Image (cartoon, rainbow, N blue to C red):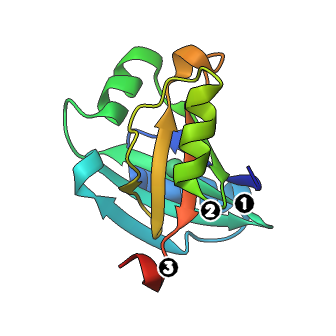
Amino acid sequence: MRKIEHLGIAVKNLETSNELFEKLLGSAPYKEEEVVSEGVKTSFFKNGPNKIELLESITTDGPIAKFLEKKGEGVHHVAFEVEDIVKEIARLKSEGFAILNETPKKGADNKWVAFVHPKTSNGVLVELCQEITSQDL
Ligand code: ZN
């Protein structure tokens, strides 16, 4: 794991939360993106070398909708940048972590992503992410 790439925060309303986080961080989101396969609408803020991702559900039964129902708004996942996501998935599996998707999938912000189940990581949903390069396409 190279570094924390971003923190993912589940919100009920992306528009009002964009305004709130713009006030908090002192800068506007640099991108908004829908990830239909995940049932979310996202926005990204830069904060120094790190990023904050806000996630609003666009479905009633997707992972963010379920999270909001159970826990309410708040920190949803911690994302780490990795050099080789396939190797990292294999390494974490061999260490006993439960991986939610063993094949990396396309996430927001031009990344391959995979998630570690919070039941094996002290309640923290961990996202692995690796930048998609032109070689992958
Ligand atoms: Zn994320």
The quarter of the picture where residue 94 lies is top right
Element marked by disc 2:
helix
For the residues labelled 1 and 3, the Cα–Cα distance comes to: 29 Å
The amino acid type, in three-letter code, at marker 2 is Glu
The amino acid type, in three-letter code, at marker 1 is Leu
- Specify the label residue 25 is tagged with: 1
Q: Position of residue 71 (x, y in %)?
A: 47, 18
Q: What residue did someone put label 2 on?
A: 22
Residue positioned 48% across, 64% down in the render: 111
Front in this rendered view, residue 103 or 72: 103
Q: Say whether residue 37 is left or right of residue 129.
A: left
- Above or below, 15 relative to 11: below
Q: What residue did someone put label 3 on?
A: 133
Front in this rendered view, residue 89 or 50: 89
Front in this rendered view, residue 48 or 97: 97
Q: Are marks 2 and 1 in contact (CB under 8 Å)?
A: yes
Element marked by disc 3:
loop
Between circles 1 and 3, the one closer to the viewer is 3
Mark 1 CB within 8 Å of ligand 1: no
The amino acid type, in three-letter code, at marker 3 is Thr
Q: Position of residue 110 (x, y in %)?
A: 45, 70
Q: Say whether residue 63 is left or right of residue 46.
A: left
- Closer to the chain start, of discs 1 and 3, is 1
- Above or below, 131 relative to 19: below
